[in-house]
Image: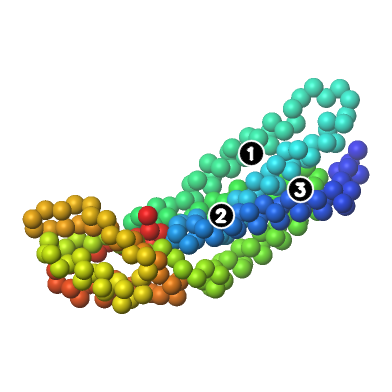
Amino acid sequence: MTGLESLAPLPIQLDWLLRIIVAAVCGAVIGYERAVQRKSAGVRTHIVVAIASALFMIVSKYGFADLLNMHDIALDPSRIAAQIVTGISFIGAGTILVRREQISGLTTAAGVWATAAIGMAVGAGMYLIGVLSTAFLFLIQVLFHDDTLINKIILHVRFNIQIEAINKHHILPKIQEELKENQVENVSVKILDVSDERIVFSVDGIINNKKDENDIIMALRKYPDITRISYTRGGK
């Protein structure tokens, strides 16, 4: 039986495609929450991982039907596929870089993983689902290549900074007042370290996604009692 002769009927392949689309939607929902928190793995990364996982599962369940239907088969045809999933994960991990507390390469790693799933699908004779998954992933990568679309969807994001200042009784009220003027909502202040000379605390809040964090930081820097401000995109 050749690969073309063993193609699944169109309704079954459409069902596989539906599973991939549902997985993508679920990944997008989780990624949206992470994007609001300003985490490195956002909407695009979660969608790619969800699609790849669904495709791996489909290949694992249905990609070896032609072999398993043969007589006198005494081997596990999915063994090599399982090793591909594990092996390609190490390659993807090599593309993730951490520089100055900023993580890059997560989406690239997820893309490499998804590419392996597509290669497995085509290799298993699941041509239609492999091609459609490729088109779907390409569309996702193009749409979410930058933050333009995400910024239109996400209205508010988390804002977190650490401030070191001279320990004076008026410093906390002044900072809270400045944050309020810069439209930082739900402000929460947590003291991390305090002495007679200095105080270190964490400020957490919510800002409009169109608000530039740099403007807030520069507004706080005008106070001479503040000696240092640390900001990491992604919050807590």
Q: Is residue 151 above or below residue 104?
A: below
Q: Is residue 64 left or right of residue 210?
A: right
Res 36 label: none
Q: Residue at x 12, y 58 (%)?
A: 198
Judging by the rendered image, the residue that carries numbered circle 1 is 84
Q: Residue 60: name its quadrant.
A: top right
Q: Residue at x 19, y 61 (%)?
A: 164
The image position of residue 117, as x and y in percent, is 67, 47
Q: Residues within 10 Å of mark 2 (few under 14, many from 20)?
A: some
Q: Is residue 9 left or right of residue 174?
A: right
Image quarter hosting the C terminus: bottom left
Q: Nearer the viewer, residue 1 or 48?
A: 48
Judging by the rendered image, the residue that carries numbered circle 2 is 30
Confirm whether residue 191 shows in the render. Answer: yes
Q: Is residue 219 above or below residue 49?
A: below
Disc 1 element: helix
- The Cα–Cα distance between marks 2 and 1, rounded to whole angstroms, is 26 Å
Q: Residue 32: name its quadrant.
A: bottom right
Q: Residues within 10 Å of mark 3 (few under 14, many from 20)?
A: some
* Amino acid found under the numbered disc labelled 2: Ile
Judging by the rendered image, the residue that carries numbered circle 3 is 122
| Cβ atoms at labels 3 and 2 below 8 Å apart | no
Q: Earlier in the sequence, mark 2 or mark 1?
A: 2
* Amino acid found under the numbered disc labelled 3: Val
| Cβ atoms at labels 2 and 1 below 8 Å apart | no
Q: Residues within 10 Å of mark 1 (few under 14, many from 20)?
A: some
